[in-house]
Image (cartoon, rainbow, N blue to C red):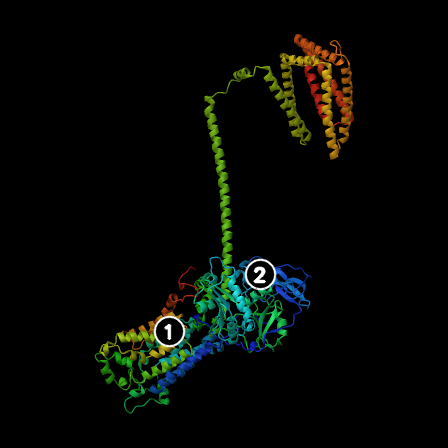
Amino acid sequence: MAFIRVTSPHAHSANSTAGVMRQVLLATLPGLAALTVYFGPGTLLNLLLACTAAVAFEAAVLKLRQRPVMFYLRDYSALVTAVLLGLALPPYCPWWVVVVGIFFAIVVAKHLYGGLGYNPFNPAMVGYVVLLISFPLEMSQWATPKGALVDGQSLPALGEALSKVFGVADLDGYSSATPLDTLRQSSGQTLEDLYRGAAIFASGRWAGNGWEWVNIAFLLGGAYLLYKRIFTWHAPVAMLASLGVLAIVFYDSGSSNSAGSPLFHWLSGATMLGAFFIVTDPVTSAVSNKGRLIYGAGVGVLVFVIRTWGNYPDAVAFAVLLMNFAAPFIDYYTVPRTYGHNKAPRATAKKVE
Amino acid sequence: MRQIWDIHGGVHPPENKHQSLQSPLGTIALAAELVLPLNQHIGNPAIPVVRIGQRVLKGELIADAQGIFSACIHAPTSGEIIAIEDRPIAHPSGLSAPCIVLRPDGENRWTDLHPCDDPTLLDHAALVEKIRRAGLAGMGGAGFPTAVKLNPRSTDVVETLILNGTECEPYITADDMLMRVYADEIIQGALLLARIVGSPKEILVGIEDNKPEAIAAMQTAAQGTAVEVVVFPTKYPSGGEKQLIQILTGKEVPSGKIPAQIGVLVQNVGTAYAAWRAVRYGEPLIERVTTVVGEALTVQRNIRVPLGTPVAHVLEQHGFSAAKCARIIIGGPMMGYSIEEPQVPVVKTTNCIMAPSHDEMPPAPPAQACIRCGLCAEVCPATLLPQQLYWYAQAEDFQRLENHNLFDCIECGACSFVCPSAIPLVQYYRAAKNSIRRLDAEKQKADRARERFEQRKERIARAEAEKEAKRLARKKAADEMKSRLDEQKPAAPLPDPVAAAQEKAQTVPDDADGQSKKLGRQLESVQSRLQHLQQQIAECEDAARRDALTAQLRQAELKLEDVRKKQDDLERGVSLPLDQRLQNVAQKIQASPLEAQRNAVATIEKRLAVAVEKMEDAAREQKPTLAAFTQGVEKLRLKLAEAQAELAELERQPISSDSVNPEENAAAAAIARAQAKAAAAANMSAEEKHAEQLQSLRGRVDKARAKLAEAEASGSEHIAALRTGLEKLQAKLAELEQGK
């Protein structure tokens, strides 16, 4: 009678990678709902397209790499990438934009680097940046939020949306400048004037109609994940804090040179999506808690710098990719002190002390 | 309220402690045979002191500690030793190891124990010795010999003694049960251990808050003593030694150091209990409390089990179903190891036997990719970065692993427990540690080999250099000598041999006495040389060498001849010795015959006394020479009687001056002969001298020949010597005849 030999520990928590991914997907629901409410069914179509393409690409690449397809598909990581990219893309963008973005995200950014866990750059953000650089026109046409529509207009119905996405018909008048664009182009106006004059701000409360609620919804989703201990608070809080601090420094009491209030920066663009769903991606961020603080703060600073002085209205994707570069470097200098040691080890040290 | 510190990380696996706490502490029937591994502890295995077939009593020593770092082993019950052989033991490797196998006789008869009513009367050394003789080894985990731990280095002063009753592993309740049932004895044990380590400032018992009954029992028992029961929140792995120290004192044990170096000593509650039993009652460690738990059993509880009981027997007694059982684990689900062979025995460190069902402990899911979620780093009690270690372990980047303090990993399994990708992290660390240890060992070996090789090379080079130096020195010396000779030749011509001879002749001592002495010495030396050469020739087997030796012998003989001749010349040339002889003889004649006879009697008496003494000695020692001595003594007695009779005769005779006795006549005749001879010699011509010598030599030759014939007839051992003597005489004779 011989029994199997297994090494300890024999007990395992109920944790699983698929479970983590499912929680993340679940947490995007408030944001998705807000986007749909304020911008119509465009985002839903994005997600649908993105998910389909992602699963197809993932399966194809796994097949090519001779990996068990279903085993890896079941970890939901491809779906998370697809959902995050889908949420970030402008609603009603052409279908091929989504497919190209997903191709770069899944095939190039993820699998060409070795698959899940080995990719140095956030796949969704790689896809997004490729699209932003390659197709600036399609990527800059954001839908007009519900409250900022001109009289008589309403959000497009599903049929209209489909015909727009697949290029059958054009949806003129449904796109307009985002709050970030508006602020960039408003040189000479004080913030007060801007908030009163521009439709998108006038119909909103803090950071533009729709956008503020979308961000608040993502914040809620992020809070849920924090509560579920899917990730630690370090990176998102550091990012929001550094962004807020810079916003305060350059607020300039709302003059025409003002870069916008902290609240404006927190609640506009992809700030909350980035803070809770992109920066927290464990694969591409720093490893230790201290490292994550630095990493998150770096993203926050870059977001503000690019938004205020850069060429692109929003900056989360660029900021995240830049900090992805820096993550291994941060890791080298943020190794925690081990129990029983006086100093933290130097990860770069070649010799054992 | 005492301050409690928190440890980094930790996890909360399902506790599953209730299953084994439903029934009271039980016992089981004795197994058919008990298997006692010789190494149940860290350190050297014990050495058996019993032989196969020997009957032993319960508690009798069956294997003795080998050195300090070892522990004794005792018979858990009375019975017969039936084997000392390799048996599978409870070890993660699944390997076999030497064990003593005992077949119980069922009588369970104790050997004589040596209880001690008042351990406070014993001193430190006596207490430690008692604990050492009882075979105590840490009962919580690794099995560190307790006596070693109780003898900290003199520089390490123990300020805090901690009893570990944490038992943070899920499922295990052995310590919990022990504390419930034997709280008083554990507290006594704690006080005893405290006394041994020099009465530390604090004696703490650390217990997790999920054991309320044990806490209550211990608090009651500790009342009025110096022992303080400290309760802290349940979290795995609070019971790790380093973690418990951090929780109770806030101190960290420096990496690579032991707790004693920060003034802390940790002992398991089970060890404290066993120490008390050992000192107070003299009981060696022969049983322990073990949790038997798992859904593949019908009964789950804690039992007191004799050491050496096979796990299979324990499981059998608890309604074990092999079909239901997923794996058998020794220890808990977090750090325990699975065993393949259920026949392995319970040892001093076995605190739990788990037989979980398939549902209870399903096989681990296949590992997925690490998503660097960092949960492992969050739960690591050693504040390591497990996922980084995992990367480096996969890459076999051993330098980075050591740099990231892999060796501070306590293998608690918290990281593996939380890993969402189900990566067996601990296994990677164990493998990496082993690889590093192996590489280190190999490196050391290679270093030593290289050192040896280099030293050898050096040695050879040195030897060669020395040889070369010697060669050069010789050459130089030879050259110098040559050049000096070349220089000296014209400067100092060889001395004129004629002048030297003349000079030498002048320095020769003039006086005849000195010359005679010199000749005597020469004669002696030549004779001894001759003797030596003869002996060598007799012993020599090599013909060539014998020829050489014979030639030398001839030379020596010639020399001897030469010396004798010189002596003769000297005697002839000088009258002094002759005068002396004449004087001696004259003195003898002048003495009265009576006196002479008296002297003769005295001499014979003296000789007789000596001979008697020798005879007695020989008789006492039973020497074979006794007969000869006896004969000698007889002869001497006869001679004495004769001499005495003669003396009596002489005394009776009136002394007359002209009376002539034969002796006087003989002496006078001898004197006359000698005088005549001397006169004749003085007056003899060379020719006459020669003729006389010739005649005397002939006489000697005849005598020698007769002697030799006699020796040959009687087979004497002196034949060879006589023959050479004869040959010499003949040679001399021939020489003289030629010289005529």
Q: Secondary structure at mark 1?
A: helix
Q: Is residue A217 above or below residue B459?
A: below
Mark on residue B4? none
- For marks 1 and 2, give the one nearer the viewer: 2
Q: Amino acid at mark 2?
A: Lys
Q: Closest to the observer: B515 or A178?
A: B515
Label 1: how many residues lie within 10 Å, few (<14), some (14-19) or many (20+)? some
Q: Secondary structure at mark 2?
A: helix
Residue A23 visible to the viewer: yes
Residue plotted at (75% across, 23% down)? B708
Q: Amino acid at mark 1?
A: His
The N terminus of chain B is located in which quarter? bottom left
Q: To which residue does mark 2 refer?
A: B130
Q: Position of residue B562 (x, y in %)?
A: 63, 18
Q: Is residue A164 above or below residue B578?
A: below
Q: Quadrant of residue A344?
A: bottom left
**Residue that extends furthest to the left in the rendered view of this protein:** A188
Q: To which residue does mark 1 refer?
A: A234
Residue plotted at (65% across, 72% down)? B29
Residue plotted at (58% across, 70% down)? B289
**Horizontal arrangement in the rendering, residue B143 relative to residue A256 (left or right):** right
How far apart are labels 1 and 2 at the CA level? 56 Å
**Horizontal arrangement in the rendering, residue B409 relative to residue B52 (left or right):** left
Marks 2 and 1: in contact by CB < 8 Å? no
Q: Position of residue B167 (x, y in %)?
A: 51, 71
The C terminus of chain B is located in which quarter? top right
- For disc 1, the chain is A
